[in-house]
Image (cartoon, rainbow, N blue to C red):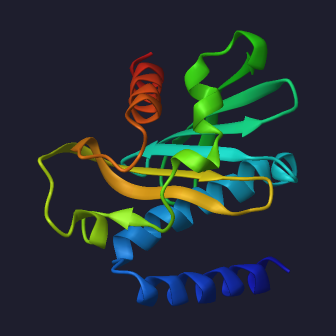
């Protein structure tokens, strides 16, 4: 079953790669994130929204929305085979930062996969610096919003500034501890 599922995923990714200006590295970031989600969280994701933010395809922050809370997982991808959940945090919705409520609202995101090679940046960008990031929000139905592979610092940013800044700061804090 896993082989046919992986083959199907590759077919879909290939179709998407040719319909957008995505390169192999852009696709790789998506595949790594999907593999980590499947490896660590597949059963927890059923009928639940989730958010992925990574830096350098190595450090990951996964948030899974529950009824009254979010579960945050800090994952370190050690190499192409091994990864570990470094820290798990439960965040109560009633006491969470407002930015998380916004982050789980599909209306704030653009559709499609945005990279420096896609039409969003057709006219260029003002500033881009730092390691590459991967971001995406997936709703309960499996629809993906705000998918992007950019840099830690980027202007303009297709992701809501408050949301993006929150995840950059949060992940950098977890990495430094």
- Tell me residue 25's x, y (percent): 36, 70
Q: Quadrant of the C terminus?
A: top left
* Front residue of 82 and 121: 121
Residue 77 in view of the camera: no
Residue at left 37%, top 77%? 24
Residue 70 in view of the camera: yes
Residue at left 13%, top 61%? 124
* Front residue of 58 and 92: 92
- Tell me residue 4's x, y (percent): 77, 86
- Tell me residue 11's x, y (percent): 61, 89
Question: In which image quadrant can residue 115 be found?
Answer: bottom left
On screen, residue 66 versus residue 98, left or right, reads right
Question: In which image quadrant can residue 61 be found?
Answer: top right
Q: Quadrant of the N terminus?
A: bottom right
On screen, residue 82 versus residue 167, left or right, reads right
Residue at left 40%, top 81%? 20
Q: Say above or below: 71 vs 8.
A: above
């Amino acid at each position: 079953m896993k082989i046919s599922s992986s083959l199907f995923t590759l077919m879909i990714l290939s179709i998407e790669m040719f319909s957008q200006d995505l390169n192999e590295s852009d696709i790789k970031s998506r595949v790594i994130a999907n593999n980590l989600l499947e490896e660590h969280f597949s059963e927890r994701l059923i009928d639940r929204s989730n958010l992925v933010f990574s830096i350098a395809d190595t450090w990951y922050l996964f948030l899974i929305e529950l009824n009254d809370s979010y579960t945050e997982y800090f994952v370190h991808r050690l190499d192409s085979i091994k990864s570990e959940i470094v820290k798990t945090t439960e965040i109560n919705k009633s006491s969470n930062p407002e930015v998380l409520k916004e982050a789980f609202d599909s209306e704030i995101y653009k559709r499609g996969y945005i990279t420096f090679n896609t039409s969003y940046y057709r006219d260029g960008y003002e500033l881009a610096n730092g390691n590459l990031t991967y971001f995406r929000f997936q709703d309960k139905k499996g629809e993906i919003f705000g998918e992007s592979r950019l840099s830690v610092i980027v202007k303009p940013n297709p992701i809501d500034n408050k949301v993006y800044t929150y995840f950059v700061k949060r992940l950098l804090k977890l990495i430094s501890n």
